[in-house]
Amino acid sequence: MPLSSVPAAILAHMMAIENVPPPPLRSLPSLKMSRHIDYGQLNALCQTRGLQYNQSYCSILSSHNFFIKQYPKIFPQQKIRLPKLFKQEVNRKPTEGTEESQAQQPAEDSHNVAVYIKKARGGHTLYGPKKSEENFVEFLAILKKLPVHRTPSEHNTVWRTLRTIPNLTSQLSDEHLKILSKNIISETWVKGSTVIANDGFYIILKGLARPQTRVYKSLVEENESKASFIAQNYHSFVFDEDFKNSLLAGLRIPSCDSMLGQWSTFGTLEVIAQTESIAKYAVVMEEDCEILRIPAKDCTKLKLEEKKLENKQKVKLIRQCPYYEEWPTLSIYELVGLIKWKKFPPGHVIVESGSIISFVAYINSGYCNVYRSIVGLVKLQSKRAKKVRKLVYMGQLKEEESFGEISVLLQLPFTCTIVTGKEVEMAIIEDKDIFELDPVTKQLMLQTAQPTFGHLTDEDVKNEYLQEEKQKEWENFKDKTMKESLYYGGIIPGFGKWSHQWTSIPRNLKDSLISY
């Protein structure tokens, strides 16, 4: 088409398109070098001779094998860092006439592999609850503070640390230790000073000490009082044949005068009488020591408060029992001193009918089912009947009720069988303690107490048994009639379209069954 025949507008548009510059070139994203590939090894491997097709078969095979062997080297492997093993530091003890380069004496536990394994894993050593250096410094700093200035987290730190000391946890419960840990501070004792440990329980945090007197302990008789001096560290000893022979002879062997080091304990948690000698409680500081003291008075006060609270609970339990509502307080307190707490699992037979119970019980929580035995007839398949002794449910003994007073005091057989319905906690008084009561208290118990379900006569038990049997017969007849009616209508529950897996019976069906 000649340009003269092209319209002027189209021609102007074509000229404008020709004058438009081309679009700029886009830059390609830079490729990131992978950290898991060694590109130097990859380039050297790709330039291996013998990989071309124009080579002979043998050269290609050898080059291929070489390539396969060198191929894993292009992937650098990370070095596995093993945990660091800490070497045990042993203090050198140079002797006269020896040089410093002389081999030092091995420690007692140098052949114990468990010590090194625990140290490598950052745990405690075998000889005590040793913490890491940072935690121990923090623990000492907390103990330097007054108890009112400590945070709840710092109180928990002190409590958790004290829980790792066996000689302390064996004498105090966890709750008592938690309360006492909130009021203790550390004490600093200089070298040469003497600590009289008859007023508390002491724990050495830093330094060394030794008992002033040799501690004797019987290895045959184990009737020592808990209030005796306790000097413990975490070392064991191997005894020779002479020691074993003296042990068999019943001699009292003096214990080793070993030094008391870090985490060693001594003292007592009981208040010592003023007339007792305090010489055996003396400990001499061999170095400047940091010592933690738990006062024996605080421990005794805590136990007395717990005892008062427990006695108050016992008095309240006995007072709320029906037979003891009118009892004088003095007589109730005589029973409180004899009470022991005991728990019984569900289904436990406490006493059978015809036997004498061995304690008086006051139910604090749970309940017990009471049964009476009766001789009933059981139908056999041969249209015969035989006599069988059965237990008839007569009622329950609930919380704040007691039983066993009459059976223990008068030594009369129990007329009922008592079985726990669920876990039951009781306050019991054993029969030997009941017999040691004064005559007034025993007479008062006989006058106020009554036999358990003693108001029931044999006629009442028979009527209850007949009611239970009639109820069982009615249940069996109802179930049999229901099944026959459903089967007559072609309904077989559990088969075909009548197979339903209900987690609960629908309300409308339940109402219809009840009305039926």
Image: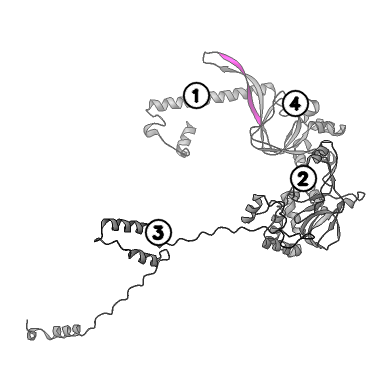
Tell me the amino acid under the disc marked 2.
Glu
* Nearer to us: label 4 or label 3: 3
Task: Give neighbour class at mark 4: few <14, some 14-19, many 20+ (Cα, 10 Å).
Answer: some
Q: Are marks 4 and 2 in contact (CB under 8 Å)?
A: no
Pointer 1 or 4: first along the chain: 4
Which residue position holds label 1? 477
Horizontal placement of 433 versus 102: left or right?
right
Q: For residue 282: magenta?
A: no
Q: How many marks?
A: 4
425 vs 473, nearest the viewer? 425
Mark 3 — residue? 72
Chief secondary structure of the magenta portion: strand
**Could you say whether the residue bearing mark 1 is in a helix, strand or loop?**
helix
Instruction: Give, as a single range, the part of the protein colored magenta.
Output: 382-395
Is 502 placed left or right of 96 in the picture? left
Marks 1 and 3: CB-CB under 8 Å? no
Q: Is residue 333 above or below residue 112?
A: above
Q: Residues within 10 Å of mark 2 (few under 14, many from 20)?
A: few
Q: Nearer the viewer, mark 1 or mark 3?
A: 3
- Residue type, mark 1 in image: Phe
- Graded by Cα atoms within 10 Å as few (under 14), some (14 to 19) or many (20 or more), the crowding at tag 1 reads few
Q: CA distance from mark 4 to mark 3?
A: 86 Å
Magenta span contains residue 386: yes
Circle 2 residue: 310
How far apart marks 2 and 1 lie (CA) works out to 55 Å
User: What's the amino acid at mark 3?
Assistant: Pro
Q: Residue at x 9, y 83 (%)?
A: 6
